Image (cartoon, helix red, strand yellow):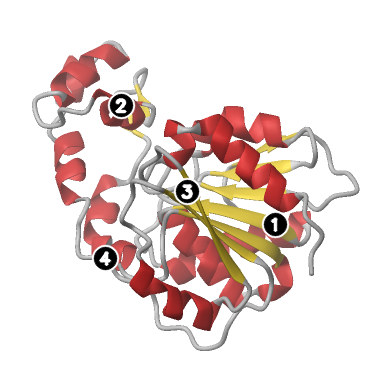
Amino acid sequence: MLNTILHGLPGDQPPLLIVHGLYGSARNWGVIAKRLSEARQVIAVDLRNHGTSFWADSHSYDDLAADLAEVLEEHGPADVLGHSMGGKAAMVLALRRPDLVRRLIVADIAPVSYGHSQLDNINAMRAVDLTRVERRSDADALLARQIADPTLRAFFTQSLDVANRRWRLNLEVLAQEMPKIIGFPEISGSFEGPVLFLTGANSTYVRPEHRDLIKARFPMAVFAKIPGAGHWLHAEKPREFEAAVAEWLGRPIP
């Protein structure tokens, strides 16, 4: 089963399952998860090939959704929040196993295929000579040769096991499976529960032309934007993100 980090105790409210994006981990969501756990138990997961979860040769969204279903079969039906790749996995979970999902929050992603690839970031991490890494700052300096953004470098180095000089990311499989990661599977049917598509106002990942497709698969979908945020909305505007999530989860289900 996936590695999980539990915040808070089970209570009257259903748990909230948080699913990170590509190159992320449950630990990245620690502050937000802890704050949201004041109202309900929060379950943050490491997806396969990430964090301290198992490595596997496949990284399809049906695989990811099946892994999430296994977690929820133990903890019970939940509200589910997923960002980017994790949002796609959460959407597939809701479409495949609607019995396990009460409500869904999809953070800055649509159920579509994207043209961009993340292989440049994988190649940058592969290029780091881990034999020269004594501390996280060493890896940051080596990554800076290919990645200018210090925020992005800091995010990547969170997935570095410095003591053992290894990435907690299965870079080989993630590269091999990139066409599946940037794609979205063909799935018939729809999820009839409430869904919030929460996006960064400065992001272009969820565009107006996606809305008809979103509504076809998620008829109860509503849309909201966080001003001043891009794709990494939960990292750029954490308090605003947390407030939007908490407010929506606090609404009664129609």
The amino acid type found where label 3 is placed reads Phe
- Tell me which label, 2 or 3, sits earlier in the chain: 3
- The disc at residue 114 is 4
Residue at 24% from the left image edge and 66% from the top image edge:
179
Quadrant in which the C terminus is drawn: bottom right
Q: CA distance from mark 3 to mark 1?
A: 24 Å
- Residue at the far left in the pictured view: 145
Secondary structure of the residue carrying tag 4 is loop
The image quadrant that residue 74 belongs to is bottom right
Q: Residue at x 35, y 41 (%)?
A: 169
Can I make out residue 92 in this image? yes
Q: Dot 2: what SS? A: helix
Q: Work out how far the residue at label 2 is from the one at label 1, CA to CA, in angstroms.
A: 29 Å
Q: Earlier in the sequence, mark 4 or mark 2?
A: 4
Q: Nearer the viewer, residue 169 or 228?
A: 228
Residue placed under numbered mark 2 in the picture = 151
Dot 4 or dot 1: first in sequence order is: 1
Real-space CA distance between mark 3 and mark 4, rounded to the nearest whole angstrom: 27 Å
Residue 208 placed where, x, y %?
37, 68
Q: Secondary structure at mark 1?
A: strand
On the image, numbered disc 1 is attached to which residue? 79
In percent of width and height, residue 84 lies at 41, 53
Circle 3: is it few (<14), some (14-19), or many (20+) Cα within 10 Å? some
Q: Nearer the viewer, mark 3 or mark 1?
A: 1
Q: Which one is in front, 63 or 245?
A: 245
Tell how many labels.
4
Residue 54 is labelled as 3
Q: Is residue 128 left or right of residue 48?
A: left
- Name which residue type carries label 4: Tyr
Of all residues, the one furthest to the bottom in this rendering is 188
* Residue type pointed to by label 1: Asp
